[in-house]
Image (spheres, rainbow, N blue to C red):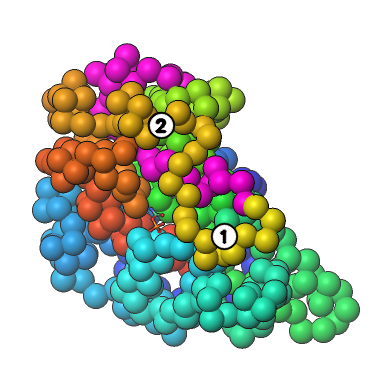
Amino acid sequence: MSKAAVRSSPRRKPAPSSAASSVGRWPHRHLLQLYGLPAADLRTVLRRTRTYAEGLPASLIDPHDVGRGGKDFSHELRGMVAANLFFEDSTRTRVSFSVAAARLGVRVIDLTNMGSSVSKGETVGDTVLNIAAMGADAMVIRHRSSGSTHLVVRTLQERHESAARKGGSPVPIPSIINAGDGRHEHPTQGLLDIYTLAAAFNRLDTFDLKGLTVVILGDIGSSRVARSGVAGMTALGARVICVGPPSLVPAAFTTLGCEVSHDLDAVIHQADAINVLRIQFERHEIKQPGAAENAPKATSSNAIASIREYHELYGISPRRAGHMKRGAIIMHPGPINRGVELTPEVADSGRSMVLRQVSHGVAVRMAVLGLCLGAR
Ligand code: CP
């Protein structure tokens, strides 16, 4: 069994999926990380993504990708309930999971720190046990602690097994989907970045990324997007180079199967795609004891000398983008610090796939929900 997922146990079956026939077998009930997921499983979810993308309204998906539109998938998971548990802020991922669930007929319950009993000190473990006891079929979880979704799965399994041993009625185990856990992984972001690459380079038939060089640029050490990207892209054959200042790009990243460079100008001409990451000032911040939760967000970091210098050396300006290959693309998971890692001209240019990524995210999340909730 891969570390990325836990195989399914008996559960209520969703309606037969019209998308299911086009993809391979998917043995995972949860999606916690891309690291360790075999290429065949990545291709299964990407093929299912394509099926959904082809059915989404044409306005959502670039017509060159697919986007014939007009299909109704709402019967596929009708009657199921998903809980979005976002203990850390999000715009794209949270809304995208809600849109994806709605398109599959899943009802979504939203829970955040504010307005939940987490603000009264309830632990994440108790929160998920309570929501599982209400019968949610899936939980989409974002949390600032790396490894938190693994902990959630373990908590649910232990409670389930302990109740079964005692002859009680076990708490059902919903599908757990990692929507970003600290610096660890953001698997659906990794998948939508891969899908965007495949669409841009005409690889939607094979999802084989051999021959493509992807630069992942910026605050690599803080980034769950980088870890998911390296795992998924290298598994599908891409060459990945993580680039940024030594203080933000740990040399140990090479053990994940990528290369590391601190000189963007030395490698930019090799890139077919640059995935530009935000500097996550909030993860560099050392919280003072007793500091208020709503204290102003950090905008500086000890890891870089100055934002101006960072932009000079690692920011993508029109001049620097001019050194990229013809046809090379720029991606960014968002949110963008305009003027820091990307100038507004580049962010809104023809090379930029930023909004295309967001659109693909809906189809990716439909695929993940469809596969995990239909896992058998
Ligand atoms: N890309 C991403 O995870 O964005 P959000 O933080 O807005 O969800």
Task: Tell me the distance, in whole angstroms, between the alpha carbons under discs 1 and 2.
Answer: 29 Å
Disc 1 secondary structure class: strand
The residue type indicated by label 1 comes to His
Position in image of residue 318 (x %, y %): 16, 31
Looking at the rendering, the quadrant in which ligand 1 lies is: bottom left
Q: In front here: 160 or 82?
A: 82
Q: Quadrant of residue 135?
A: bottom right
Q: Which residue is mark 1?
A: 143
Determine if the C-beta at disc 1 is less than 8 A from ligand 1: no
Disc 2 secondary structure class: loop
Up the image or down, 279 lies above or below 54; here it is above
Which region shows up in magenta? 260-287
| Residue extending farthest top | 266
Mark 1 or 2: in front is 2
**How many other residues sit within 10 Å of disc 2, few (<14), some (14-19) or many (≥20)?**
few
Q: Residue at x 86, y 74 (%)?
A: 165
Q: Quadrant of residue 149?
A: bottom right
**How many other residues sit within 10 Å of disc 1, few (<14), some (14-19) or many (≥20)?**
many
Residue 266 falls inside the magenta stretch: yes
Position in image of residue 68 (x %, y %): 13, 61
Q: Residue at x 17, y 49 (%)?
A: 65
The residue type indicated by label 2 comes to Ser
Q: Earlier in the sequence, mark 1 or mark 2?
A: 1
Q: In front here: 184 or 340?
A: 340
Q: How many marks?
A: 2
Determine if the C-beta at disc 2 is less than 8 A from ligand 1: no
Disc on res. 306: 2
Q: Residue at x 34, y 52 (%)?
A: 335
